[in-house]
Amino acid sequence: MTGLRRLTVALCLVLAATLPQAHADTAKVTFILMNDIYLMGDAAMPDGQRRGGFARLAAVIKAERAKGGHVVLAHGGDTLSPSLMSGIDQGAHIVTLTNMLKPDIFAPGNHEFDFGKTVFLKRMAEANFPVFAANLRGPDGQPLPGFKDRTIVTIDGVRIGLTGATHDDSARLSSPEDLKFLPTVATMKAQAEALRREGADFVVAVMHAERKQGADLIESHTVDLVLTGHNHDLFIAFDGRNAMVESGHDAEYVTLIDVTIEVKLEDGRRTVAWWPQFRVVDTATVTPDPEVAAVVAGFEQELSREMDVPLGSTAVELDSRNATVRTREAVIGNLIADAMRAKTQANVAIMNGGGIRAGRIYAPGTAISRRDILAELPFGNRVVTIDVSGRGLQQVLENGLSLLPSAAGRFPQVSGMTIAYDPRRPPGRRILSIKVGSRPLDPKKTYRVATNDFLARGSDGYTAFGASKPRLSEDDSPLLANEVMVHLRRLGIVRSGVEGRSVAK
């Protein structure tokens, strides 16, 4: 080698040693998303398989954690309610089971507020996992103690920002009392920008929100990965820059997102590149985790015992036989319709006689248990509230009376109104008069009607209901059976008999 070449090589080595070098960090992280989990155990599906429930979900999570990689378990909210067990313990069993799963971030859903502010705060205090709700504030506008807005975790040199939000429409959907809710999208944008300023390379928002809110956040490009709950469907979207995911409800399907994040440091600037891979686990394919399954079995035994605890009793005869509830006013129909109206504060309530199923007589003095109510209302219906014109209300009532004198499931058991009708007149023209409260029905007035989700969809000829949009979605509406149980417990004793709510002339 000549002297000139030696000098050139030496100079190159010196320059290489003195010039700034590019530096790269790479993190591989698996995000597991769970959301909208109400049922403790798995459930039989139309394809003959069993899916969902905490034990199958736990099996998915434990299998992933056992691989030894970096796992972030996110919960998109909605779990304390509604379910039969939650109607008894106000979601305490859900917290116990969720504690066993050890989420890394939990964003409350609107159903977390179903039992009111005090119960919500109590359940969140029992949680052994971090609760993120950047858009939730106390009545004084300040953050709630113990709740988080955002945080940054560092994995293999990569800084990952986490933030979360609850449903900003919870005041309408549930019962949070004086808690305050900031707009979800604006709050998540602000939190993401704060995380970037604080050094986050990659930002994840876990939130319970409408699908459009998630889409709006994605379009803002302020958040890299949005993990959501609320819509109950399996949803995956990736536009090459941002991703949004929701797992199916009740852990029937669980979504895992494998993300490789590469951060390069050049001239003091950090540049980030990432790419996701999506895996959907059908929980019919996994064996339930035995530890969690044992705890679920214990709760199910407790639920079974609670089913036989009396809620109240009746001082009058209750008759749920088809020949009664499908042809005329029935005391048990009044009880159910009254429960719907009490829950919703609606003007009137309508329950179809065909939804009352046990077909038995409860003699005066009979104690009535939760199991009795479930036998009468076995379909898992929900209480739905819709706005209907007086003319539309008369149409649905004419439909309910149209098959008399034959017993028909569409026969209306009502609350808040009285109907006089002549079953000898042609169908569609049988009603002689309707009063809502003490006033005659006004065809042009809009009435708030409580009914069940089956009728609200326009089923059984209740087409005027189907044309009206429910004030709350079915998923956000309470279980009918639970509301009847609550109403019966408040009454203590059913004392009212047939009151002339539906009278054939």
Image (spheres, helix red, strand yellow):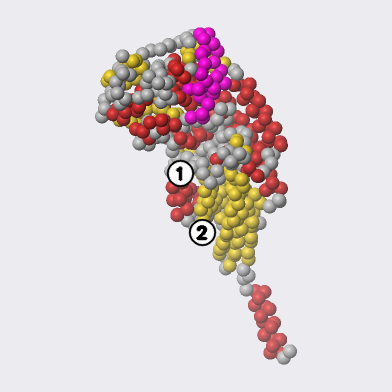
Relative side of 84 to 59, left or right: left
Pick whichever, 143 or 328, lies toward us.
328
> Which percent across, then down, holds residue 330?
43, 16
* Image quarter of residue 450: top left
Q: Which mark is residue 210?
A: 1
Amino acid identity at mark 1: Glu
Residue in the image at 61% along x and 45% along y: 282
> Which percent across, then down, holds residue 279?
60, 52
Query: Crowdedness of circle 2 by 10 Å Cα count: few (<14), some, many (20+)?
Result: some
Q: Quadrant of the N terminus?
A: bottom right
Identify whether 228 is placed above or below 78. Answer: below
Relative side of 370 to 170, left or right: right
Pick whichever, 214 or 405, lies toward us.
405
> Which percent across, then down, holds residue 387?
35, 31
Identify whether 11 is placed above or below 244. Answer: below
Residue in the image at 65% along x and 44% along y: 285
Q: Quadrant of the C terminus?
A: top left
* Image quarter of residue 21: bottom right
Residue in the image at 37% along x and 30% along y: 462
In the current view of this chain or complex, which residue is farthest to the bottom?
A: 2
Q: Gap in Å between the C-alphas at discs 1 and 2?
A: 21 Å
Residue linked to disc 2: 241
Residue 126 seen in the current view: no
Identify whether 220 is placed above or below 498. Answer: below
